[in-house]
Amino acid sequence: MVTTTVCPFGPELQEFWEMRHDLFSRFDEGIRIDAAGLFGVKPEELALRTAARVRGRTVLDALCGVGGTVIAFARTGKLVTTCDIDPDRLAMARENARIYGVENRITFLVDDIREVMGRVEADAVYLDPPWGGKSAAERDRFGLDDYRLDGRDLLRRAFAITPQVILSMPPNFVLSDLVPFGRDFSVEQAIRNGDLLYLNAHFA
C-alpha cells in the first residue's frame, strides 16, 4: 500500500494509520482518534459483524475507547451504555458517534467500569480490556492476568449481569484461561487481508 500521509502518532503506528478508513469508513468527516485508539479500535466491518451476533436490545460496552465498537452496536439497532474514566476519550467517542448519526442511542458515562457494572442492566456485555500495547500480541502467550485490568474480575462482574458476554482477546490468547468459568463459548476469528487481528470469545 502506498503511504500518502505520515502517521501523526509516530512511525511505529504507521501501518494502523494507513488502515484508518477500515477502522472508520467516515474517517475524513472529522473522526477523532488518539494513538491508543488507532491501535486498539476494531475495523468497522469486523465490529459490525460482532455486533450483529448479539441478541437482545441493550448492550453494556464496558470500555469505550474512541467508540468504534460502541458505534457498531448502535448501528445494528442496540441501545448502548458505555464508559471511560478519561473524559477526553469519551468526548472523542461521542463526536465519532455523532458523525455516524447514532449518538442518541448511546449513554456515555465518565466512570470506572467496575463501578458501572455494579448498577447497570443489559442483555449483553462486551469486554475489550486494554492489552498493553502492540507488544502484547507479540508475546508467546497472553492470558486473563495480562490485561491492564483484571480480566478474571471483569468476566465475573459481566456474568453477574448476563450470561451473554463477549471478550475481545489478542490472537495469542490462551483459551484454556476461560475454561474455569464453566461456561460454553465459541471463538470468533477477526481476519483482515489474511491476517488474524484478534479473537472474540462469545459466551451464550
Image: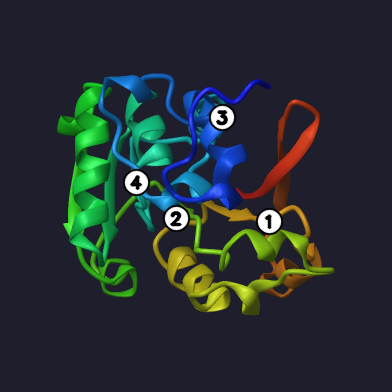
Q: Callout 3: 10 Å neighbours few (<14), some, many (20+)?
A: some
Q: Which residue is mark 4?
A: 66
Q: Dots 1 and 2: beta carbons under 8 Å?
A: no
Question: Is residue 153 shown left or right of residue 202?
Answer: left
Label 2 secondary element: helix
Q: Residue 89: x, y in percent?
A: 27, 54
Q: Residue 155: x, y in percent?
A: 53, 68
Q: Callout 4: 10 Å neighbours few (<14), some, many (20+)?
A: many
| Mark closest to the chain's N terminus, 4 or 3 | 3
Q: Residue at x 29, y 38 (%)?
A: 32
Report how far apart the C-alphas of labels 4 and 2 lie in the structure. 9 Å
| Mark closest to the chain's N terminus, 1 or 2 | 2
- In which quadrant of the rendered view does residue 80 lie? top left
Q: Which residue is mark 1?
A: 170
The answer to which of 31 and 52 lies nearer the viewer is 31
Q: Dots 3 and 1: beta carbons under 8 Å?
A: no
Label 4 secondary element: loop
Q: Residue 198: x, y in percent?
A: 68, 47
| Mark closest to the chain's N terminus, 4 or 2 | 2
Q: Amino acid at mark 4?
A: Val
Q: Residue at x 57, y 76 (%)?
A: 152
Report how far apart the C-alphas of labels 3 and 1 lie in the structure. 18 Å
